[in-house]
Image (cartoon, helix red, strand yellow):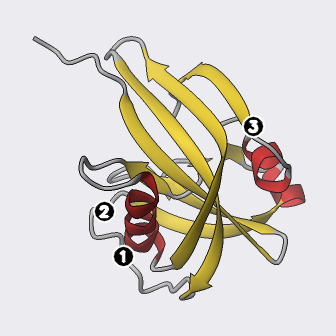
Amino acid sequence: MKDNTPRLAVRALIVSDDRLLLVNAWPGVQSGLWCAPGGGVQPGQSLPENLRREVMEETGLRIAVGLPCLVNEFHAPASGFHQVEIFFRCTLQGGALSPEWRDPEGVVSNRIWASRAEMEQLRFKPDGLPEAAWGNGISYDPLELLIK
């Protein structure tokens, strides 16, 4: 029997020099879709612990995890996949993006720092990403279809 439990994930909103860190995260292929770094939660670790681990794996950066600022969920009706993501405002604590860095899981193929103006030229998810990154408070992005 298939488990239809939604997958829980955490994502980091890291703004430095008025630019948001984005990753291109599709295993084995580079998609034109960008998102905040992060990933699935492992049981037995807190959400901030999971997020620090995921960001280190995907970018090589060390972060301090702040408060949640966005809850997003998406699904793929054909497969039954449903993911709930909690986005946290984070602060860069160390490291730098390096072209030699490789995601050990092979999911992230590229990383960029994008200004809000540059994001207008990019495909990204969730739709509320800029408002969450440069805004205040907490928001919810309604259930949306998973796209590639």
Q: From the viewer's perspective, is 28 left or right of 139?
A: left
Is residue 38 or residue 47 the one in the foreground? 47
Q: Give the percent coordinates (x, y) of residue 34.
A: 60, 50
How far, Cα to Cα, is label 1 from label 2? 7 Å
Which tag, 3 or 1, sits closer to the chain's start? Answer: 1
Write down the residue under mark 2. 106
Tell which residue pokes out farthest to the right in this image.
Answer: 117
- Establish if 76 lies above or below 129: above
How many numbered marks, from 0 up?
A: 3
Name the kind of residue labelled 2 in the image.
Gly
Residue at image coords 70%, 70%: 113
Residue 34 visible at all: no
The numbered dot on residue 55 is: none
Which residue type carries mark 3? Gly
Q: Which residue is mark 3?
A: 128
Q: Is residue 146 in sight in this rendering?
A: yes
Disc 1: which residue = 102
Image location of residue 133, percent across then percent down? 76, 53
The kind of residue on which mark 1 rests is Arg
**Does 109 sit above or below residue 29?**
below
CA separation, marks 3 and 1? 28 Å
Dot 2 or dot 3, earlier in sequence: 2
Which residue sits at x=45%, y=79%? 60
* Numbered disc in front, either 3 or 1: 3
The answer to whether mark 1 and mark 2 are in CB contact below 8 A is yes
In which quadrant of the rendered view does residue 65 lie?
A: bottom right
Badge 3, how many Cα within 10 Å: few under 14, some, many 20+? some
The residue depicted at 51 percent of the width and 66 percent of the height is 110
Residue situated in front as seen by the camera: 125 or 121: 125
